[in-house]
Amino acid sequence: MKKTAIFYGTSTGNTQSVAESINTHLDNQAELINVEDAKDASVDNYDFLFLGTSTWGFGDLQDDWEGFISDLASANLEGKKVALFGLGDAEAYADTFVDGMGIIYNAIASKGCEVVGMVSVDGYRFDASAATVDEKFVGLPLDEDNESNRTEDRVAMWMKNIRPHLD
């Protein structure tokens, strides 16, 4: 498996729980890094990056990402593979669902990395999202507030699609 890190920002613990679940699907071989403690140089140490955030308020990036997103945008991502996951509330914030994931995507999309793990919008109920491109989410969207019962199945299915990119 490629040298892998899971970078996440969490306020309530939900994004951290998803990061830990992803790592379980990787036989706990990835390094879990809270972006609150991350430094831009740490990105250089990995070939495969999982980047996870929640969305707050009306489409805002999780607070800990605010300090790390500029470091990430200026890091050398050339040749790396990246998979994104985002948490949001599709009922209360249906018009900004997982926008935080879209903010990260926009920061890295032109940095020479390959974004993998896009997910069809089918099966999700929301009005708008900055995290969609051509009827696909740019990563795995999760709604722990309203569909937590679907999270583990969605993570497992997504990881089956990600796994070939890790070899």
Image (cartoon, rainbow, N blue to C red):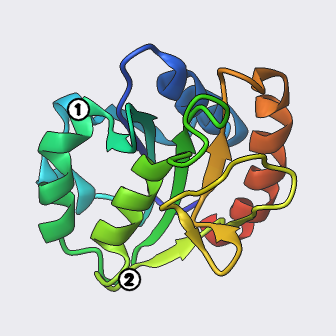
Residue depicted at x 53% and y 20%: 14
Q: In this view, does 114 lie to the left or right of 74?
A: right
Residue located beneath label 2 in the image: 79
Specify the amino acid type for callout 1: Asp
Residue depicted at x 85% and y 60%: 122
Q: Is residue 121 depicted above or below 61 in this figure? A: below
Q: In which quarter of the image is residue 27?
A: top right
Specify the amino acid type for callout 2: Gly
Residue 8 visible, this angle:
yes
Circle number at residue 164: none
Q: Is residue 64 left or right of residue 139?
A: left
Residue depicted at x 41% and y 66%: 105
Q: Sequence-wise, which precedes: disc 2 or disc 1? A: 1
Q: Is residue 110 depicted above or below 158 in this figure? A: below
Q: Quadrant of residue 160?
A: bottom right
Count of numbered marks? 2
Q: Is residue 112 depicted above or below 48 in this figure? A: below
Q: Is residue 92 depicted above or below 60 in this figure? A: above
Residue in front for this viewpoint, 11 or 3 = 11
Q: Quadrant of the C terminus?
A: bottom right
State the SS at label 1. Answer: helix
Circle number at residue 64: 1
**Residue 60 location, x and y as percent?**
32, 41
Residue depicted at x 40% and y 74%: 80
Q: Nearer the viewer, mark 2 or mark 1?
A: 1
**Residue 116 location, x and y as percent?**
60, 71
Cβ–Cβ below 8 Å for labels 2 and 1?
Answer: no
**Residue 21 location, x and y as percent?**
65, 30
State the SS at label 2. Answer: loop
Give the CA distance from mark 2 to mark 1: 26 Å
**Residue 6 location, x and y as percent?**
44, 43
Q: Quadrant of the N terminus?
A: bottom right
